[in-house]
Image (cartoon, coloured by chain):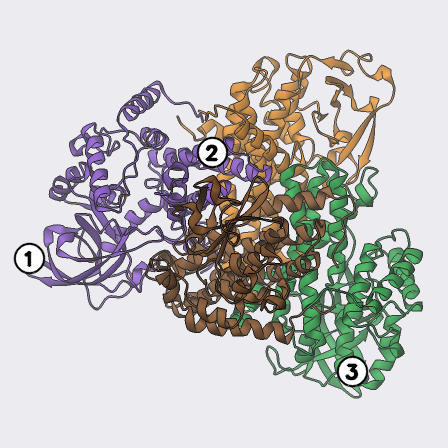
Chain colours: A purple, B green, C brown, D orange
Amino acid sequence: MDLDFTPQERAFRAEMRDWLAAHVPERLPSMDTRDGFEAHREWERLLADARLSVVSWPERFGGCGASLVEWLIFEEEYWAAGAPGRVSQNGIFLLAPTIFSYGTAEQKDRFLHRMARADDIWAQAWSEPEAGSDLASLRSRAERVAGGWRLYGQKTWSSRATYADWGFGLFRSDPDSTRHRGLTYFLFPLHEVTVRPIVQLDGEPGFAELFFDGVFVPDCQVLGAPGDGWRIAMATTSSERGLTLRSPGRFMATADRLVRLARSTATDPALADEIARAWMDAEAYRLHTFGVARRIASGEEIGPASSMGKVFWSELDVRLHALAVRLLGERGLLAEGAPDAEDGGRWLDGFLFSLAGPIYAGTNEIQRTIIAERILGLPR
Amino acid sequence: MDLDFTPQERAFRAEMRDWLAAHVPERLPSMDTRDGFEAHREWERLLADARLSVVSWPERFGGCGASLVEWLIFEEEYWAAGAPGRVSQNGIFLLAPTIFSYGTAEQKDRFLHRMARADDIWAQAWSEPEAGSDLASLRSRAERVAGGWRLYGQKTWSSRATYADWGFGLFRSDPDSTRHRGLTYFLFPLHEVTVRPIVQLDGEPGFAELFFDGVFVPDCQVLGAPGDGWRIAMATTSSERGLTLRSPGRFMATADRLVRLARSTATDPALADEIARAWMDAEAYRLHTFGVARRIASGEEIGPASSMGKVFWSELDVRLHALAVRLLGERGLLAEGAPDAEDGGRWLDGFLFSLAGPIYAGTNEIQRTIIAERILGLPR
Amino acid sequence: MNFAFTDDQLALASTVREVLTEHCPATAVRHAGQAAPRDERLPAWPQLAEIGFFGMLVPEAYDGLGLGLADAILAFEETGRAALPGPVVETAAVAPALLGDDALLARLAGGGLRVSVRLGDQVYAPDADLADLLVVERHGELHAVSAGSVRLTPQAGVDPVRRLFSVAFGSPEAVDGGKRELGRRLDATAAHPLRTATVAVAAQLVGLARHLLETSVEYAKSRKQFGAPIGSFQAVKHQLADVAIAIDFAAPLVYAAALAVDRASGTAAAGGVDRAVSAAKATAGEAATRAARVALQVHGAIGYTGELDLRLWLARVWSLASAYGDTGVHRSRLRAAILGTPHLTRWP
Amino acid sequence: MNFAFTDDQLALASTVREVLTEHCPATAVRHAGQAAPRDERLPAWPQLAEIGFFGMLVPEAYDGLGLGLADAILAFEETGRAALPGPVVETAAVAPALLGDDALLARLAGGGLRVSVRLGDQVYAPDADLADLLVVERHGELHAVSAGSVRLTPQAGVDPVRRLFSVAFGSPEAVDGGKRELGRRLDATAAHPLRTATVAVAAQLVGLARHLLETSVEYAKSRKQFGAPIGSFQAVKHQLADVAIAIDFAAPLVYAAALAVDRASGTAAAGGVDRAVSAAKATAGEAATRAARVALQVHGAIGYTGELDLRLWLARVWSLASAYGDTGVHRSRLRAAILGTPHLTRWP
């Protein structure tokens, strides 16, 4: 057991740090505005030119074949440099792992490189109005027609869908099926779907509703076998919950910013205590992730253990941001545009965003039940 | 609305304070030892001589007819004076309200005055090995015989039973009944029952198991109607959970002792913050109780609202003692008899005792469910 | 000793509640967060004026009701429950304490004068653009100025309804010179008005928390997941029960603080009253913050959006929890008061 | 970067676990809390000596295994899981760091020397009556004395097994004079030994917490109330899940602290290592304390009594959580280290 980076890993870190120092732009407008979305797409393209948009992917799809530890290093440096949020993250972290595992050679060639270059930006379409946490109760359906399928129904909480190019989600392809059976995984262009933006707490349309009234999807845009969607989607949501989406770098950067803020402010010792603790918890999450990365690298299945990480990071993220808001007093609740807002209102944005953490990708209540039943073995 | 005591209430407080200052003994040995039990009985008799063992009872049963507010004042003064724990409390607070409501005139005359004088000390016998929180699943049974009943079965967690004189509890008198129906409330002398002490965390037998193998109980020792035991016992457990047993005085005295301890010790500000908060919570519990007392005095039924108080005081009590233990560092875990123990080990005793609070008289999980279903109206 | 509200106190609150139910529904609150015209940003204000709401704490000699803060505390709680827009606390609770014996009091009591303040550690004046009169503490002195005579800079924040403004003085003449009525130094000190503001806001937080709990309970009864109402799951039940407990034990501290403020009114300093005020604000702020967190968790993603009005109540909780000292500030004051006072006495 | 235990490290822990399963069952722990004779209070000690446990951290030149703390950390975790009686950490982890290059090391490695310590802010020497050698810090100097040459006063506490003693020096000659072997001043400073003790105890707390979680899960599966196993109720599930999460995120801090101590061994002061040590102890102490609270809540009244052995594990958690600085002490050190350091760097 050690915590020493290899010379190669150290060199990789130095290279990333230099590149980011030279290229990270000033703060971009919100990716949930049209201009901001395109600005974020440009940034993704700049990353892609340096093969840094998907460092862990093979070179032929636009990556640079980085190891898991190198990916974690990249993420640490990325967020420490104050680089923009990733507008491509739904595709890269939720869909791509499924394409790598279950896609045809043609699908890989058609979609992955364009995704890496942000030529296609993807939106997820998991939830439905009556199926939030309970994905198995999906009702949107797919009808078999010559050469493909027609999609009907409604999806909601589709993040990025207002401005994205493509969407992915599950539809009930066998009308007689119930629960987990008979669901198929579809890929569809969003311009053929009716998209209704949903305004969030921060006033921007970070989510949208999608309405399908018979949009045609050819067979080549079905991922995996028809009826097998649930199983391969579970691999995807496990990516969403597990290591891949929530690298420690983001929380470490937030914790460091919080500590800098506390040092520059007169901080009550009781509040300072909570801040120090949150910083330490970010450290715990990092160390925990190094352990998980090691297990993944040796071929272990992480499975339900990823639920532990989900609960921990989502509650840590709320705490980090809530502490900053408290620390700033009345100024903590100022938004972008307010002359007195600290750091352009990023703390408030981050606070509101963090509150969704314990809800999405399986609420923390569901995660705790998964831990109790599938890890501890308690009865249903 | 006001928080001003009347001249009469202020005079009552002054009188109590003077009497207690003159009479409260040095710390008595633990009431869960034989000597300690008898020493506590003597103290109860001293209280009774001054009509202070049951201030709110009518004079003919040994009390002085105090109002509810006066009783709260008595309790504040009692605990602030550092007076001993009440060895008679099971009888006074759990059984007596039921005798007052459902007992025959003969039962009142026979039991209440002797209870007030600690001539009889009572032990509760609610739980059974397979029925802890779920009282309705009791299995101990009563068989009808000429002139009375014979009791069979086993009870557990009977507090004070090791040295007490009498016991009270529910037995299934209708063999065909299930759950809440067919239970009868019996009063029985403990010397006819086999008592096995249970050693607690603190090493003393605060609880005991009771074994019944056909002990005869005459009809005059049945409380209420046969088969009606559950209903009248519920009135009793509501007393245990509600206002009567857990007056704020005890927590206020603990909070004051904690603050004095913190003032005499170098206290980290983060710990000081929690201590100040716990003191304030004791204040909140006191104010809340003044409100509840007012509602009871105007004839309102408190009902499930008493569950709120149970959760609050039991968790506050744990916090108050855990804070003192933390404040004392290594000395916090010393027991009575250790030369360095603070205040004769009372903080550790109190800490261990407090841990039972969230468990007994209906676990706090059950209380939260009661609040959700019966106060908020959430579905079962 | 009678720690229960009188029939008069209950009747006042109930009247306020009826007015707000009719004239300040959620749609009006939502609209107030978008609307530009003044009157659309002040729903129910004319009706509240009619029932004497703005004169509750004004002496009868000036056409007010001559009540104490404790008499009015449930009425303030109702304004929180309804998330009533506008400088409610500043006009109805703070201004009477600031203006003292003053000709403006009668106008205030009649609902003809809206007031915003920036006192003590306050950084921004809330709803200052809706106020006729602004009272600002500057170098330890209180100045009453007309809203037009100072420069107000909007500081956009989380709450689109309760807007914050920084205040800058345009020209020296605007202060202490100007018209007799609107630009002059006040004799009052900020201590009592700040206590009043803090307790009235604490009451609003209790009201907000009650609304959030009720709304969450209703949602949990109707929303189904995994084939059952989510309110039938123990995890949801226990979170909501904890909110109910937090509210039930915060409210008495707020009511007791109102009594303490009334008793101390006029006297300069009283350790007991400041302790009671800080206990009220710290605890009410925490209860409401918890109610907000649980409401969001129970509602799930939809609570987060403009689809529901929930977000307006959430934003108000955050906004008021930080107003007049947040939980942390008041808890550190409590720490000093409780651990730093050699002879700690309880009240009463 | 390979933050996973090697096969050798895992094998050592597994051997220790097997020995403890066989020779230190719960009955032996219970008996150790009652027994007077020394050997009955030290179950599994001879067998642990045989497998070289007490020489893990002793250099090979002195017949030890020459391992680092990180190599042995899982073995210490196992001693926590079994609630192994006796001065385990003081003998196997602290003494090698204290005695340095010393003839006693070989005796220690062979299991022939039991050690207790009172260093730094420690008030009491644990299990001092079972020790041959006592190392006491006094006026900033470390003295090794035979247990017989000082006055030990038992300080009865919550844990009947891990007994605490105050230490008083009977006669001045006993110190610094006396026999060459047992009464002399040591060259070492307390910093490194204390770090080692703190991290080893943190590992024991993780082990205790794991045992409490397993025991509670088993009980929750079998105990029925309201017609179902209590482990099927969401409220119980979620409390146990939170314990699992707390342990899962405390353990890596403990392992990283062990690596940091090994890296810093020999050097005088290193901010990073002290921060890592405090993070480990604060977090492990809190995880174990939470495991104890939940265990008691899940077991109900019976967990509170001598009917089950649970109370021995509860008492050990409380005892070790307060040893070598409790969570509050270490958190205030962390606060100073994190907020007081101008250039905070992470390790590695």
- Does residue D210 lie above or below D278 as drawn? below
Question: Could you say whether the residue bearing mark 1 is in a helix, strand or loop?
Answer: loop
Q: Nearer the viewer, residue A329 or D240?
A: A329
Q: Residue at x 53, y 30 (%)?
A: D339
* Same subunit: marks 1 and 2: yes
Asked if residue C241 lies left or right of residue A122, the reply is right
Mark 1–mark 2 distance (CA, rounded to whole Å): 59 Å
The answer to whether any part of residue B130 appears in the image is no
* Same subunit: marks 3 and 1: no
Q: Residue at x 78, y 32 (%)?
A: D165
Q: Position of residue B37 (x, y in %)?
A: 86, 59
Q: Quadrant of the N terminus of chain C?
A: bottom right
Mark 3–mark 2 distance (CA, rounded to whole Å): 68 Å
* Same subunit: marks 3 and 2: no
Using a 10 Å C-alpha cutoff, classify the residue at mark 2 as few (fewer than 14 neighbours), some (14 to 19) or many (20 or more).
Answer: some
Q: Are marks 3 and 2 in contact (CB under 8 Å)?
A: no
Q: Tell me the mark number nearer the camera, choosing from 1 and 2.
A: 2
Amino acid identity at mark 3: Gly
Q: Tell me the mark number nearer the camera, choosing from 3 and 1.
A: 3
Determine which residue is flagged by label 3. B103
Q: Chain of mark 1?
A: A
Q: Are marks 3 and 1 in contact (CB under 8 Å)?
A: no
Disc nearer the start of the sequence (1/2): 1
Q: Quadrant of the C terminus of chain C?
A: bottom right
Determine which residue is flagged by label 2. A261
Determine which residue is flagged by label 1. A147
